[in-house]
Image: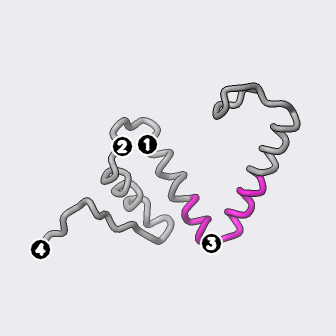
Amino acid sequence: MDCPVMNTRMRHSQRRNLHNYATGFYLFTLSSRVYRKELVKLTLLWKSNQDTTELTAASIIRRINAQAKLVGSAIVNPFERKST
């Protein structure tokens, strides 16, 4: 199996250790309500950006806020001017 990060081949023990770390991190993330919300936010953002080429800070924050109803929180966008 090729490792995309190091661009080398990984040994079986390295794959097993990486898998154990990823599984442990995933379980830890889901055990916390705050981390679970952030994971959902990032997953939804990643899915919405799959076929989009425009990635600016403002567009990312708009997309996160559009999905905020599902997770119950929103991010303040420092790049947008407030209407008076």
Q: CA distance from mark 1 to mark 4?
A: 31 Å
C-beta proximity under 8 Å, tags 2 and 1: yes
Label 1 amino acid?
Asn
- Per the image, label 4 sits on a secondary structure element best described as loop
Q: CA distance from mark 2 to mark 1?
A: 8 Å
How far across and how far down the image is residue 57, in percent?
34, 52
Left or right: 14 in relation to 8: right
- Per the image, label 1 sits on a secondary structure element best described as loop
Q: Which mark is residue 77?
A: none
The stretch in magenta equals 23-39
The extreme right residue here reads 13
Q: Characterize the magenta stretch by its predominant secondary structure.
A: helix
Q: Compare marks 2 and 1 and give the one earlier in the sequence.
A: 1
C-beta proximity under 8 Å, tags 3 and 1: no
How far across and how far down the image is residue 16, in percent?
85, 41
Residue receiving disc 4:
84
